[in-house]
Amino acid sequence: MDSVLDFLLTEPLATTPLDDVGAAWTRHRVAANRFGKPVDVAIAGGFGADRLGFAFLSGYQEALRTLIPDLPADELVALCATEAGGGHPSAIRTTLTEELGRYQLNGTKSFATLGMLAQRLVVIASVGTAEDGRNRLRATMVDVGDPGVHVTNLPATPFAPEIPHATVTLTDVAALVLPGDGYLDYLKPFRTIEDIHVLAATLGWLVRVARASAWPRAVLEQLLTVLAAVRGLDIDAPSSPGVHIALGGAFEYFRRLSAESDSLWESVDSVTRQRWERDRPLLAVAGRVRDQRLATAWRSVLPGDDQVA
């Protein structure tokens, strides 16, 4: 198959229901064997999902593999950054210390996607304060089964409840320290990379819904158009103002297309339709932060423009 776009239009629709994250991950791995680029795997994984939550799983996992290409292909991975004070770099209190060449993590992450199902954790931790007062961060990696890692599942969220979340407590946990700056090279770019891959996976899933429910060809054309735009974003430069501005346009196009397609959901089977109504708030979770990034991007290229929010 030369193109993931052809795949979306010609691949037979999987009919076996996905009972849990394990089944969704297995189907995702089948898609991963057919495509090389993480964004294409996210799209194909979303197409294979039978609900938005499992499409999110595909997007989230491939976003992490774009961020850290050497991650094991078959393991579920979770990024652990958020703490009791939030996800801002200044709120991170988990510490990374070194003694005799051995690095240790201590602290608690309050919201880790995938909960106990994750096999590997990418943990953002502080190594102290810089001269300018900023929190200096590093990215580390640990296995969930390592000594000192304690995972406690949180109650299910109102939307996409199939995707669990957890708190993670780290007590003298041996860590592999990843190269680069924890904020500039990991935490900051991941927010954009995740938006790109989750949107791509969502669009792949919507193509599946559109085909299964015989939506008009014009809608399929529009879904593929915004998908092509998302695929074309420069993922190698996730901090670029141009990428943020183009991504903002893609989300706006998607928002309008979703609104225009609302009436078509009457033709969708009731289970899928009810899940969509329940789960669609998932797509707005990072909306405020995304809007702030978009405004900052516009200010950086048009600093004197009064229309920039």
Image: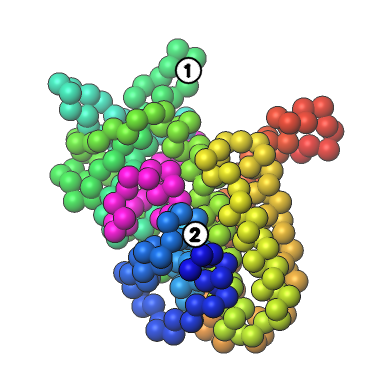
- x, y percent for residue 256: 74, 63
Q: How many marks?
A: 2
Q: Callout 2, which amino acid?
A: Asp
* Label 2 Cα crowd, 10 Å radius (few <14 / some 14-19 / many 20+): many
* Label 1 Cα crowd, 10 Å radius (few <14 / some 14-19 / many 20+): few
Q: Is residue 267 above or below residue 51?
A: below
- x, y percent for residue 155: 39, 62
Residue 228 is left or right of residue 103, and the answer is: right
Residue range (magenta)? 60-88
x 46%, y 38%: residue: 187
Residue under numbered circle 1: 133
Residue 226 is left or right of residue 190, and the answer is: right
The Cα atoms of the two marked residues, 1 and 2, are separated by 41 Å
Which numbered marker is on residue 40? Answer: 2
> Which quadrant would residue 230 be assigned to in this image?
bottom right
Q: Is residue 17 above or below residue 229?
A: below
- Nearest to viewer (mark 1 / mark 2): 2
